[in-house]
Image (cartoon, grey):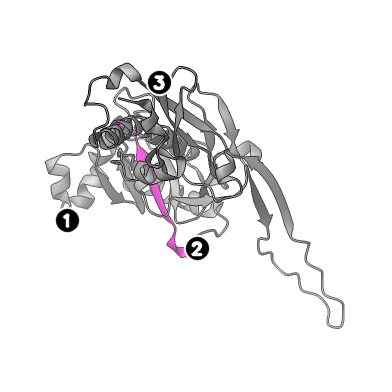
Amino acid sequence: MNMDIFRSDAFSLTSMLDPVNKLDYTPQYLGTIPGLFVPNPVRTTGVWIETQSDGPALIQTSARGTAPKTKNRLGRDARNFRTLRLAIGDRIEAEEVQNIRAYGTESDLLTMQKEVATRQARLKNDWELTMENWRLNCLLGKVIDADLTVLYDWATEFGQALPTEVDFDLDNANPAKGALRKKCAATKRGVVKALKGMGGSIVEVHALCGDAFWDELVTHAEVERTYLNWTAAQDLRKGIEWEAMFFGGIYWHNYRGTDDGTTVAIASDKAKFFPRNAGIFRMAYSPHSTFEFVNTLGQEIYSGIVLDKDRDMWSDVEMYSYPLPVCTMPSALFSGRMT
């Protein structure tokens, strides 16, 4: 095996962009919801976000013949935020591919492409998990790094306040009639009002539920009565874990995070509410920091090979991404607790 094979066109940075996008997708729920995060590729390392306030106001009556009151100037504010860098690599040692096949055979290239694809799949799994973590934290109004450092707090950045957590009182053995529906209605109204008209009539309110919250919700008397005479009641009988349902004007989801329940997860007794189709969540992507991609539109992932030029003993498969998840209206991000 000769490591010079990595200098062929098959392993150029441009050539490797296509295969990495065709690798098997590691399921990450928030990345599959249409209309949630709007992709926003940019040609720069920064993203300008403009906000404006122009809500309607009541018009005071005035005497005929007098000058009309002049409406206040449109309030606008534009700020620049830098995209972030995700980078990870996996080293292929020369000894790992020793004696795989005879030197000079035509199968060398195909075998090494398979080995590189395997390494890329491992790296992309880490990237998918990281992106899901960022999407989930963005629903909480923040961008949080792997070491739990808060990189951006969107409520602070945009001068907004997160709503007070709602107590859904799900463990009440004798709840008042319609109490749960009233909680749902108040939460949905709060989300929609906080959007200031964004999304219009197509906005949907969704909730990600931790396991304990979900179990209490689907077994609540109001929910069971609602589904009793529906064909959908079969879902409640066949199993309730990691399912979804529509109740009280809200789309509820039992969110499945990482198995440890902490790395990427919703707290078991909590629920997080967010609007879909409102356009308040954006995912910006900047271009790779090489001359080849300067001033081009950013892509989700860049993958390439770095060679050991001194000793020819290893090659690194590397993956880069330059995203920034943004929530422009964190005041619409409600949260709930089981009790």
Rendered view: 138 above or below 296: above
Which tag, 3 or 2, sits closer to the chain's start?
Answer: 2
Name the residue: 50% across, 32% down: 86
| Magenta span | 199-211
Which tag, 3 or 1, sits closer to the chain's start?
Answer: 1
Q: Which kind of residue does numbered mark 3 sit on?
A: Trp
- x then y, percent, for residue 173: 27, 33
- Single out the residue that lies furthest toward the front: 104
- Single out the residue that lies furthest toward the bottom: 65
Give the alpha-carbon distance from disc 2 to disc 1, as whole Å: 30 Å
Residue 314 tag number:
3
Instruction: Assess whether mark 1 and mark 2 are in contact (beta carbons under 8 angstroms).
Output: no
**Nearest the eye: 306 or 138:** 306
Name the residue: 30% across, 50% down: 247
Q: Which kind of residue does numbered mark 1 sit on?
A: Trp
Q: Mark 2 highlights which residue?
A: 200
Give the alpha-carbon distance from disc 3 to disc 2, as whole Å: 55 Å
- Is residue 1 visible to the viewer in this orientation of the structure? yes
Would you call the spot at circle 3 few (<14 residues within 10 Å), some (14-19), or many (20 or more)?
A: some
**Nearest the eye: 24 or 224:** 24
* Magenta stretch: includes residue 207: yes
Q: Nearer the viewer, mark 3 or mark 2?
A: 3
**Nearest the eye: 103 or 114:** 103
In what quadrant of the picture does the N terminus appear? top left
Q: Which kind of residue does numbered mark 2 sit on?
A: Gly
Q: Mark 1 highlights which residue?
A: 230
